[in-house]
Image (spheres, rainbow, N blue to C red):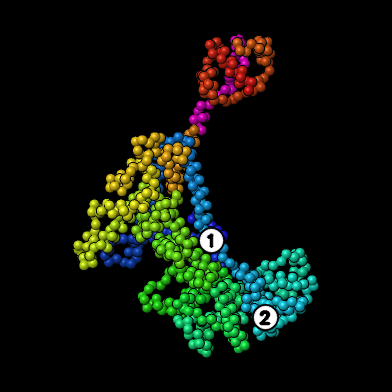
């Protein structure tokens, strides 16, 4: 399994190369485009009469800027409201409880990171390098034999010519199919295993054997002088795709798969067909490999070789539209899905394009093209192309495309990986989705999956509020569907006169929301006296109040937030960012206050004499082994332990010495004897 870290938080950066990055997706890159996350706000303004275009543009741009400021201020105020509600909740908590809540949030954050990595994981697609290694090992569609030290090496003319100048010159002298070429290498010390490793290097860009001789710089220099220094595999394969040297197969397209003979004698159609190499398409796609092997078994391949004509493969355009053929071939040679090829190549319109024009369908979006190409990739069993299409679709997720991508990925023919990315976007942007029209288009299943998540970015009050609105909207749609068609669109129809809230059937509304409301964590609704919660309880949508509000509950609302309370009403709090940040801020402030309190309780002890001097005139009864002579002799020696600062309440907590004892100037005190015992013990320690 290969995990591609993406920005949900986004961590992957796109690779550089090829055409415009906006139209090109590189395999293995699963980064989301942040630009698609925002929803462009519409500006509604009254007509100001006949104005100059410049004045109208200034007025519109000014109002748009002002509206953006209002939206930004509204968002900041909403975040401030959430922070204020969390601060009010934590105002009566002990610092240990706040710390426990923050630790719970940190644990949930770690689980979210693991969940994100798991959702990004998918089976590793075979790269061009791995498929080229299999091509060299299994010898698909070879067309020339190299003889070296009485050993035959079946190879592919086009690949060696594209990779090595030495072989390009050597193979041009024997253009016939199946030619046998005897190799004469002047570099000393090259045996059969090493020659095989050199061929493996030309196919894959890596040596296929561990030989100490490859570490010898002199041998490598001699080989580079004789064979030439090849470019990287990506560069040479891209050049092979661009120029199609030694191509041996052409791809034709027909609306009827039975009309194979109709294309046989038409030489003009070769200009419209796509050229390719059997070795490459058979190595990258099991579909093409099986097709070519079947032609060999039936004898059709022998005819093509005899006539020295390229093999023609006719594809059904209803399954593989012609407009995607060049994108597919480009990915086979480069591992890059470049959809810009669809719009820059002047090709004849495909059957699907004609059908779309006849049906009056608008131009397909980039995500829709990637969805259609994804199905073709599955048909061809070309996983690298399929994952590239998944990346394009995932990058296209926004508020405008969310519903379409969720619906497509939910089907059996859709991508489960894309479905996970769309659900992640829904959870991360749920606060924004709730306030848009997109929210009412969500299906119950997608909504249920979102509100079950611990990482949903919305407060419980907003979740409850908009779930009820969603249910009311669904109920209105039901009422409109039940309305007779004769009255539809009239003044008496539901669409015209509307439905008031009090006219809605509560029982039917409760039935619509019955599978959703149990997943609202009403114990965590803030503020505590929420009007949304009270209204839902009055309407009977929530049958029982939160557990912490019941009179039999002990310990207050913190029991519903803290796992350590073990009061039976604990519910894991969602990882809602404003709540998390405010809880951390409150904990930091409490820690600072606790530190200041400890510092205030510290007492300076630098001027207090050693406690042994205090027992000079009054010897405790328990210290009968200490004589006056010993004490007086100790006065001349410096004390072994000097305490500059000790807590004033340290001794007071044990009931031995009060804090203000040391400020007294009197040396005669009834507490001398007990203090002497404590002091002696302290000095001993």
Sooner in the amino-acid sequence: mark 1 or mark 2:
1
607 in magenta: yes
Q: Nearer the viewer, residue 681 or 251?
A: 251
Residue occupying image coordinates x 68% and y 77%: 154
Q: CA distance from mark 1 to mark 2?
A: 38 Å
Magenta part of the chain: 595-620
Residue on which disc 1 sits: 122
Residue marked by disc 2: 144
Question: Percent x, y for residue 649?
Answer: 52, 23
The residue lying toward the viewer, choosing from 187 and 64, is: 187
* Image x and y of residue 3, in percent: 55, 58
The furthest residue to the left: 492
Frontmost residue, 57 versus 225: 225
In this view, the residue farthest toward the bottom is: 265
Q: How many marks?
A: 2
Name above or below for residue 530 compared with residue 389: above
Q: Is residue 199 left or right of residue 617?
A: right
Q: How far from the left and from the top, in percent, is residue 182?
A: 74, 80
- Dot 1 and dot 2 residues touching (CB under 8 Å): no
Q: Quadrant of the N terminus?
A: bottom right
Q: Decide which of 603, 32 is in the foreground and name it.
A: 32
The answer to whether 552 is drawn above or below residue 669 in the figure is below
């Amino acid at each position: 399994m290969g995990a591609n870290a993406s920005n949900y938080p986004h961590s992957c950066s796109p690779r550089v190369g090829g055409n415009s990055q906006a139209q090109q997706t590189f395999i293995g890159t699963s980064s989301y485009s942040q630009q698609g996350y925002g929803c462009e706000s519409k500006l509604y303004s009254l007509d100001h009469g006949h104005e100059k275009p410049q004045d109208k543009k200034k007025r519109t741009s000014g109002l748009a800027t002002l509206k953006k400021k209002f939206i930004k201020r509204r968002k900041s105020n909403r975040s401030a409201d959430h922070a204020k509600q969390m601060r009010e909740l934590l105002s009566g908590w002990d610092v240990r409880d706040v710390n426990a809540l923050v630790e719970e949030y940190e644990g949930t954050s770690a689980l979210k990171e693991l969940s994100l990595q798991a959702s990004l994981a998918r089976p590793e697609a075979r790269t061009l390098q791995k498929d080229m290694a299999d091509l060299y090992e299994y010898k698909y569609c070879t067309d020339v034999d190299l003889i070296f030290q009485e050993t035959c090496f079946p190879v592919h003319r086009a690949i060696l010519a594209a990779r090595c100048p030495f072989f390009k010159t050597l193979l041009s002298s024997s253009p016939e199919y199946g030619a046998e070429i005897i190799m004469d290498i002047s570099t000393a010390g090259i045996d059969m295993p090493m020659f095989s490793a050199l061929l493996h290097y030309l196919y894959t860009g890596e040596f296929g054997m561990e030989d100490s001789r490859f570490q010898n710089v002199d041998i490598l220099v001699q080989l580079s002088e004789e064979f030439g220094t090849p470019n990287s595999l990506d560069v040479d394969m891209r050049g092979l795709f661009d120029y199609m040297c030694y191509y041996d197969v052409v791809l034709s397209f027909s609306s009827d798969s039975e009309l194979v003979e109709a294309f046989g004698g038409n030489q003009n159609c070769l200009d419209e067909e796509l050229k390719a190499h059997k070795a490459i398409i058979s190595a990258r796609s099991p579909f093409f490999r099986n097709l070519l092997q079947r032609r060999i078994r039936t004898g059709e391949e022998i005819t093509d070789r005899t006539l020295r004509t390229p093999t023609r493969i006719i594809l059904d355009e209803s399954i593989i539209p012609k407009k995607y053929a060049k994108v597919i071939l480009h990915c086979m040679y480069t591992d890059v899905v470049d959809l810009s090829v669809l719009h820059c190549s002047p090709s004849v319109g495909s059957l699907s394009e004609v059908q779309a024009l006849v049906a009056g369908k608008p131009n397909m979006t980039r995500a829709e093209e990637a969805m259609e190409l994804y199905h073709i990739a599955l048909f061809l069993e070309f996983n690298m192309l399929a994952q590239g299409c998944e990346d394009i679709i995932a990058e296209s997720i926004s508020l405008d495309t969310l519903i379409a991508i969720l619906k497509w990925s939910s089907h059996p023919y859709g991508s489960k990986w894309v479905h996970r990315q769309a659900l992640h976007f829904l959870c991360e942007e749920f606060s924004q989705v709730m306030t848009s029209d997109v929210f009412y288009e969500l299906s119950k299943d997608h909504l249920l999956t979102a509100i079950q998540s611990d990482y949903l970015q919305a407060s419980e009050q907003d979740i409850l509020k908009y779930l009820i609105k969603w249910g009311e909207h669904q109920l209105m749609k039901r009422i409109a569907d039940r309305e007779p068609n004769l009255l539809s669109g009239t003044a008496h129809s539901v669409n015209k006169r509307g439905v008031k809230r009090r006219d809605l059937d509560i029982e039917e509304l409760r039935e619509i929301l019955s599978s959703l409301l149990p997943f609202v964590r009403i114990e965590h609704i803030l503020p505590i006296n929420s009007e949304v919660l009270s209204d839902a309880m009055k309407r009977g949508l929530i049958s029982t109040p939160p557990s912490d509000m019941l009179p039999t509950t002990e310990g207050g609302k913190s029991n519903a937030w803290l796992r350590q309370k073990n009061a039976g009403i604990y519910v894991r709090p969602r990882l809602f960012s404003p709540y998390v940040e405010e809880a951390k801020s409150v904990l930091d402030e409490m820690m600072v206050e606790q530190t200041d309190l400890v510092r205030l309780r510290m007492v300076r002890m630098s001027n207090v004499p050693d406690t042994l001097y205090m027992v000079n005139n009054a010897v405790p009864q328990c210290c009968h082994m200490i004589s006056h002579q010993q004490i007086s002799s100790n006065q001349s020696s410096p004390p072994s332990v000097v305490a500059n600062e000790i807590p004033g309440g340290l001794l007071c907590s044990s009931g031995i010495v009060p804090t203000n004892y040391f400020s007294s100037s009197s040396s005669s005190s009834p507490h001398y004897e007990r203090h002497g015992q404590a002091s002696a013990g302290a000095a001993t320690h």
